[in-house]
Image: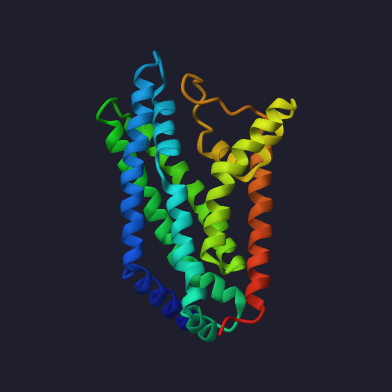
């Protein structure tokens, strides 16, 4: 059983590595991250006394275009397979839903980590054109970025399996952090309920990624009460999305 699962993971990795659409997603992540890193570094260059860790956190966490790239990846490599029928091969090879989910998750999460590393490197390289990079700060910011990206990738992976729709995966995965959450955060702030915004998924991940940035010159420092709310949101969202995806995989498979 284990050898069959390993063979399934290897086959999924080969299929993903030969998909030309992944190369376009990688190119998009590199280009957008370079622009984002350069912009944040240029803004930081106008601010006096900014800490190295705050600068590098801003460049990697907010400059890197990893979040959108991961959503595109899951829309194409996971949800898209339900549309073209290729998911049926894995469904027949792994009859247990938990093994199907794990077999499909390993390649997708590995590709997401690759996107995180490449995006962080691209943003940092562009930022180095206008600012000095501190290696210890870079290492810490990149590690947190990879960890947060892995959580985000797991969420969007489960969303792709639950929806089985590339467009719905893209709409929710991109619309939630880009449109819905900023609007909701603004409304909560106006209603004197700003502390509740840390319980939103995108803000919770931002808390974890920007935890070391305490200077306050470029990024808003994470308040003490935000960390428990963020951790609780991450745990609840992970459990709920994994359960929904597992229940969806237990049902009838697409033919």
Q: Can residue 140 be spotted in the picture?
A: no
Farthest-out residue, top: 48
Image coords of residue 151 (percent x, y): 54, 52
Quadrant location of residue 162? Answer: bottom right
* Apparent side of residue 252 relative to residue 167 in the rendered image (left or right): right
Q: Can residue 212 be spotted in the picture?
A: yes
Residue shown at 32% from the left, 47% from the top = 30
112 is higher (above) or lower (below) than 1: above
User: Looking at the image, which is closer to me, 224 or 202?
Assistant: 202
Farthest-out residue, left: 129
Residue shown at 65% from the left, 28% from the top = 224
User: Looking at the image, which is closer to me, 151 or 74?
Assistant: 74
Q: Quadrant of the C terminus?
A: bottom right
Image coords of residue 166 (percent x, y): 51, 64
Image coords of residue 91 (percent x, y): 54, 82
Residue shown at 47% from the left, 19% from the top = 217
User: Looking at the image, which is closer to me, 177 or 241?
Assistant: 177
Image coords of residue 88 (percent x, y): 51, 82
Residue shown at 44% from the left, 67% from the top = 77
* Apparent side of residue 22 relative to residue 239 in the rendered image (left or right): left
């Amino acid at each position: 059983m284990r050898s069959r699962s390993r063979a399934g993971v290897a086959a999924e990795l080969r299929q993903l590595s030969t998909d030309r659409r992944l190369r376009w997603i990688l190119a998009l992540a590199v280009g957008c991250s370079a622009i984002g890193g350069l912009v944040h570094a240029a803004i930081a260059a106008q601010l006096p006394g900014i800490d190295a860790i705050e600068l590098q956190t801003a460049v990697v966490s907010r400059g890197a275009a990893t979040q959108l790239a991961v959503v595109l990846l899951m829309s194409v490599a996971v949800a898209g397979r339900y549309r073209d029928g290729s998911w049926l091969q894995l469904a027949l090879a792994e009859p247990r839903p938990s093994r199907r989910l794990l077999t499909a998750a390993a390649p997708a999460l590995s590709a997401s980590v690759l996107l995180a590393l490449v995006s962080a490197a691209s943003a940092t390289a562009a930022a180095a054109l206008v600012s000095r990079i501190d290696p210890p700060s870079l290492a810490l910011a990149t590690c947190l970025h990879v960890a947060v990206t892995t959580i985000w990738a797991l969420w969007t992976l489960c969303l792709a399996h639950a929806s089985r729709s590339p467009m719905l995966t893209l709409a929710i995965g991109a619309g939630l952090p880009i449109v819905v959450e900023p609007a909701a955060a603004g409304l909560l702030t106006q209603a004197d309920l700003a502390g509740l915004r840390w319980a939103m998924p995108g803000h919770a991940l931002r808390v974890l990624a920007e935890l070391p940035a305490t200077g306050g010159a470029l990024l808003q420092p994470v308040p003490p009460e935000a960390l428990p709310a963020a951790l609780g949101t991450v745990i609840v969202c992970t459990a709920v999305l994994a359960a929904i995806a597992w229940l969806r995989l237990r049902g009838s498979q697409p033919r």
